[in-house]
């Protein structure tokens, strides 16, 4: 895949990062005034805890895969509205609790149907390919959405290095599950480690991003540091965070939410406004960070990536394989 | 409890019951008039408003249900009953705001969406049923209604408040994901409030029996 000559300035360098830093300064000032009104604890939750800081800058080039004409969601919202149940089930829990996770040293095991099993260090992974900034739409199965400038390179580049056997038809991703670093691990009724998976052709699709950063910096812990995948045409839970193992297999791997409620979360889970979640409609979504009366907007088939990915599912009944 | 103290306490209860509404209203006003400031309603204002009002309705409804069992702890707590109607009406008020938020921010007053939700989504069906029950209780909450219906019939009708509370809790469990245990705490509180009644009755019956035996 040829990367075209960077035509635009990466969105991370226009304003948003300065913007969120301003917001932070503003909020610190507000905090002092607000303690009396709200109590110290609520303020501590409002202003960004240390976990949200991603100070290490990443060198990125722009990518033709970035969406055009969408405003990226503010950094503050991307880092304080997370589903990362290993750190608690409320949206603001991960920002508060994920600071305890150690992202160095970090290794990713490559197992299953590969020529040679191996363990890859995170710093090797970071240098494997030039980092691209890709502004993607992100659609959660819970009917909310964001626009996020991720940093990473196509997962296919890494998979080629893993040298999978011809019989490997699926890739499974396993996330960190360490009670010592994740005190909330047993607070929900979910069996960890978190497991997700893709069909090999989905994993090899150039849109599927092995992701190391956002807004030009390394990933904050609550967003899946130090390495995660992003599959922009699928509901967010398909995009596993804080990956410690990549497993190649010839069978559809068991995936966490599918095991919890198979009638609600299919293995494919492609964004599809025509297939309702059993408990709510998927026709529309709430844009995070938008103002109250402008949140609701229509959901696009394959989250707007139909031109690139619809062919992967040719002939498949997407109501059956939801 | 002297009347003046009751009046003072009523003012405090009004303030406490209105606080969640006033805070949400202030945050909403602030966010709409200051689009560039940090949103006080958070990243997902629609969810903040609908969850906030839903919680308030459930919490106040359960507090109103706790009045009778708490009253039976002591002969001196009889005055508590004078707060029950106003708590019930506040619970109904929050249920109405909760419903309006759904109608505008989720369904956007779209008839097809409403019909779809009301026919397919069980958490919406139980939630709406709970609201209908609270509506019927709110409409018959006046002294005039008690007189018109007669004490016994009125009481029988108002026992539906237990059904409304249970439906409210089911509504909550059905909207969270499998494995998410957020509704557990409030469910335990409601269970204690509901179980307190038969337990009290049992203790009373035992006491009466003992007294009979002594005679």
Image (tube, rainbow, N blue to C red):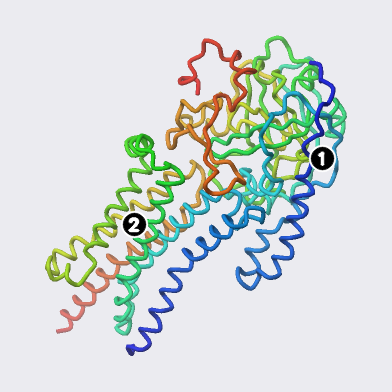
Of tags 2 and 1, the one toward the viewer is: 1
Against A230, residue A41 (above or below) is below
Q: As drawn, is A43 to the left or to the right of A133?
A: left
Q: Residues within 10 Å of mark 2 (few under 14, many from 20)?
A: many
Q: Residue at x 29, y 83 (%)?
A: B75
Mark 1 belongs to chain: A
- Residue under label 2: B165
Instruction: Return the residue found at the far front.
Output: B33
> From mark 2 to mark 1, how far is it between C-alphas?
52 Å
Name the quarter where the N terminus of chain A is drawn. top right
Pointers 2 and 1 in contact (CB under 8 A)? no
- Residue under label 1: A13
Q: Name the secondary structure under disc 2.
A: helix
Against A221, residue A1 (above or below) is above
Q: Residue at x 63, y 36 (%)?
A: A194
Q: Name the secondary structure under disc 1.
A: helix
Is residue B134 or residue B196 the one in the foreground? B134
Query: Residue A69, located in which quarter of the rendered image?
Result: top right
Q: Residue at x 71, y 69 (%)?
A: A32
Is residue A123 or residue B58 the one in the foreground? B58
Whether discs 2 and 1 lie on one chain: the answer is no
């Amino acid at each position: 895949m040829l990367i075209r000559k960077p035509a635009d300035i990466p969105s991370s360098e226009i304003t948003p990062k300065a913007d969120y830093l301003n917001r932070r300064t503003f909020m610190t000032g507000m905090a002092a005034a607000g303690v009396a009104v709200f109590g110290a604890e609520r303020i501590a939750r409002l202003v960004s805890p240390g976990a949200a800081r991603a100070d290490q800058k990443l060198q990125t080039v722009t990518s033709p895969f970035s969406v055009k004409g969408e405003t990226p969601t503010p950094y503050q919202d991307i880092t304080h509205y997370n589903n990362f149940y290993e750190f608690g089930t409320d949206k603001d829990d991960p920002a508060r609790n994920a600071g305890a996770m150690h992202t160095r040293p970090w290794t990713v095991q490559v197992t299953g149907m590969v020529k040679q099993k191996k363990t890859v260090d995170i710093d090797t992974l970071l240098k494997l390919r030039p980092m691209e900034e890709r502004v993607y739409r992100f659609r959660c199965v819970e009917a909310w959405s964001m626009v996020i400038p991720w940093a990473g390179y196509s997962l296919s580049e890494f998979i080629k290095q893993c040298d999978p056997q011809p019989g490997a038809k699926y890739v499974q991703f396993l996330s960190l599950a360490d009670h010592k670093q994740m005190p909330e691990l047993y607070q929900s009724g979910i069996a960890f480690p978190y497991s997700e998976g893709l069909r090999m052709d989905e994993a090899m699709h150039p849109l599927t991003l092995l992701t190391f950063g956002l807004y030009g910096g390394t990933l904050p812990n609550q967003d899946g540091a130090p390495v995660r995948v992003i599959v922009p045409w699928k509901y967010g839970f398909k995009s596993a965070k804080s990956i410690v193992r990549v497993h190649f297999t010839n069978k559809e791997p068991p995936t966490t939410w599918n095991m919890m409620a198979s009638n609600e979360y299919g293995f494919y889970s492609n964004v599809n406004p025509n297939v309702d979640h059993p408990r709510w409609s998927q026709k529309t979504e709430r844009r995070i960070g938008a103002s109250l009366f402008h949140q609701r907007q229509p959901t696009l088939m394959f989250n707007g990536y139909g031109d690139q990915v619809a062919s992967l599912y040719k002939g498949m009944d997407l109501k059956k394989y939801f | 409890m002297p009347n003046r103290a009751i009046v003072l306490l009523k003012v405090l209860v009004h303030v406490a019951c209105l606080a969640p509404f006033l805070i949400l209203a202030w945050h909403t006003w602030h966010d709409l008039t200051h689009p560039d400031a940090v949103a006080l309603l958070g990243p997902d204002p629609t969810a903040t408003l609908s969850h906030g009002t839903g919680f308030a309705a459930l919490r106040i409804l359960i507090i109103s249900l706790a009045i009778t069992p708490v009253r039976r702890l002591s002969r001196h707590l009889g005055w508590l009953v004078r707060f029950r109607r106003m708590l019930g009406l506040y619970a109904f008020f929050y249920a109405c705001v909760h419903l309006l938020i759904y109608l505008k921010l989720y369904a956007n007053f779209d008839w097809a969406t409403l019909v779809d939700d009301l026919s397919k989504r069980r958490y919406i069906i139980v939630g709406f049923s709970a609201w209908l029950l609270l509506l019927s209780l709110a409409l018959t909450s006046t002294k005039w209604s008690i007189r018109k219906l007669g004490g016994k019939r009125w009481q029988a009708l108002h026992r539906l408040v237990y059904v409304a509370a249970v439906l409210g809790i089911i509504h909550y469990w059905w909207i969270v994901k499998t494995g998410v245990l957020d509704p557990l705490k409030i469910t335990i509180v409601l269970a204690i409030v509901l179980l307190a009644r038969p337990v009290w009755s049992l203790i009373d019956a035992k006491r009466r029996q003992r007294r009979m035996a002594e005679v």
